[in-house]
C-alpha cells in the first residue's frame, strides 16, 4: 500500500505524516489489529519506506531552480544530487534510525543499497522521476517508514543544500540495475553509520555539535540494549553447533 502526500512546505508535510501515522494506528486498534511503521516487519516481504520527493523554488519568483531555460536539469539540480550522494551516508542514522532499519537495505527487495542516481530507475537510492520541467525533482528512496519525518526531511534537504553551496558534482547516472554497484554503498550497520555521523565536521557545523552528540548517544544506548538480547536465530543455528 502506498500513501501519497501532495507536495508543499517541508514542515507542514512532516506534520501531516505524523498525524497520519497516529490516525492510522488508532483506526487499526478500533478494528482489533495493529499498524506498524517498522522498516522491515516481515522477513520475506519488502520493507516499508518513506520516499521523499524534493524540489526547490526561487523564493523571489516561485520558479523551480532545478531546470534551466531549456527545461533540462540545471547545474543546481545536479549539485543537489551530488550533495545527497556525499552526505546521506554521513546522515544515515536520521533516515535509518534503528537496527531494524538496516534489514531493509537488501538487493532485489524494492529497497536501495547505495546512493547511485538515475532517471526513472527504481534500483538506485536517488531516482529522478519522469516529469514536466516544472515538476523536476529527485526522490530520496533511503528513508524508512520508521524515520522521524521532521529529522529525515531536514537531513535530506541539508544534504542537497550542501551539494549546491559546495558545487558537488554527482556520479554518472545509472541505467539498469544498480544493486551490484559498490562505489557509493551505504554503511552496513547502525554502528558504522553512527560513527560516520559523529566524525563529520560539516554535519556538526549545520546541525549543531550538541544535537549530533545527543542523537548519537541515544542511538548508541538503544543499540547496546539490542545487543543484550540473544535472538532466536542464534539459538537455532549456534546453540548446539559451535
Image: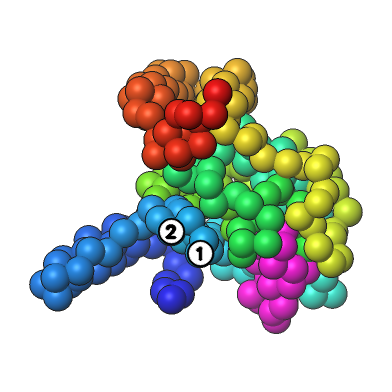
* Magenta span main SS: loop
Give the x, y percent position of residue 191.
Answer: 53, 26
Check disc 2: other Cα within 10 Å, few if <14, some if 14-19, many if 20+: few
Q: Quadrant of residue 83?
A: top right
198 w.r.t. 40: above or below: above
User: Rounded to the nearest whole Å, what is the CA distance between mark 2 and mark 1?
Assistant: 6 Å
Tag shown at residue 189: none
Q: Is residue 229 left or right of residue 138?
A: left
Above or below 93: residue 202: above
Q: Estimate the x, y position of residue 208 in percent, counting from the top left.
A: 46, 24
Report the residue at 38% width, 62% height from top. Answer: 13
- The answer to whether residue 127 is seen in the rendering is no
Which residue is rendered at x = 45% and y = 75% of the image?
2
Of 212 and 136, nearer the camera is 212
Query: Quick one: SS at disc 1?
Result: loop
**Is mark 2 in CB contact (under 8 Å) with mark 1?**
yes
For disc 1, the marked residue is: 45
What residue would you read off at disc 2?
42
Does residue 125 belong to the magenta stretch? yes
Image position of 25 (left or right of 198): left
- Scheme of image coloration: rainbow
Figure disc tally: 2
- What residue span does the magenta drawing correspond to? 119-138
Going by the picture, which residue comes out furthest to the left? 30
Expressed as whole percent of the image width and height from the top left, the position of residue 200 reads 61, 22
In front here: 15 or 100?
Answer: 100
Q: Quadrant of residue 198?
A: top right
Q: Is residue 178 magenta?
A: no
Amino acid at each position: 500500500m502506498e500513501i501519497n502526500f501532495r507536495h508543499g512546505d517541508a514542515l507542514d508535510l512532516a506534520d501531516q505524516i505524523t498525524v497520519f501515522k497516529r490516525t492510522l494506528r488508532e483506526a487499526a486498534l478500533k478494528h482489533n489489529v495493529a499498524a506498524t511503521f517498522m522498516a522491515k516487519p516481515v522477513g520475506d516481504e519488502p520493507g516499508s519506506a518513506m520516499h521523499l520527493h524534493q524540489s526547490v523554488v526561487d523564493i523571489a519568483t516561485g520558479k523551480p531552480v532545478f531546470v534551466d531555460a531549456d527545461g533540462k536539469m540545471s547545474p543546481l539540480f545536479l549539485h543537489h544530487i551530488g550533495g545527497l550522494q556525499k552526505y546521506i551516508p554521513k546522515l544515515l542514522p536520521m533516515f535509518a534510525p534503528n537496527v531494524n532499519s538496516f534489514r531493509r537495505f537488501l538487493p532485489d527487495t524494492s529497497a536501495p543499497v547505495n546512493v547511485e542516481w538515475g532517471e526513472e530507475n527504481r534500483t538506485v537510492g536517488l531516482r529522478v522521476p519522469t516529469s514536466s520541467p516544472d515538476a523536476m525533482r529527485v526522490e530520496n528512496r533511503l528513508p524508512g517508514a520508521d524515520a522521524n519525518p521532521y529529522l529525515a526531511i531536514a537531513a535530506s534537504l541539508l544534504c542537497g543544500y550542501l551539494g549546491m553551496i559546495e558545487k558537488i558534482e554527482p556520479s554518472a547516472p545509472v541505467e539498469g540495475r544498480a544493486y551490484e554497484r559498490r562505489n557509493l554503498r551505504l554503511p552496513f550497520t547502525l554502528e558504522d553509520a553512527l560513527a560516520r555521523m559523529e566524525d563529520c565536521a560539516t554535519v556538526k557545523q549545520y546541525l549543531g555539535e550538541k544535537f549530533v552528540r545527543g542523537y548519537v548517544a541515544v542511538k548508541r544506548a538503544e543499540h547496546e540494549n539490542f545487543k543484550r538480547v540473544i535472538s532466536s536465530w542464534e539459538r537455532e543455528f549456534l546453540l548446539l553447533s559451535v
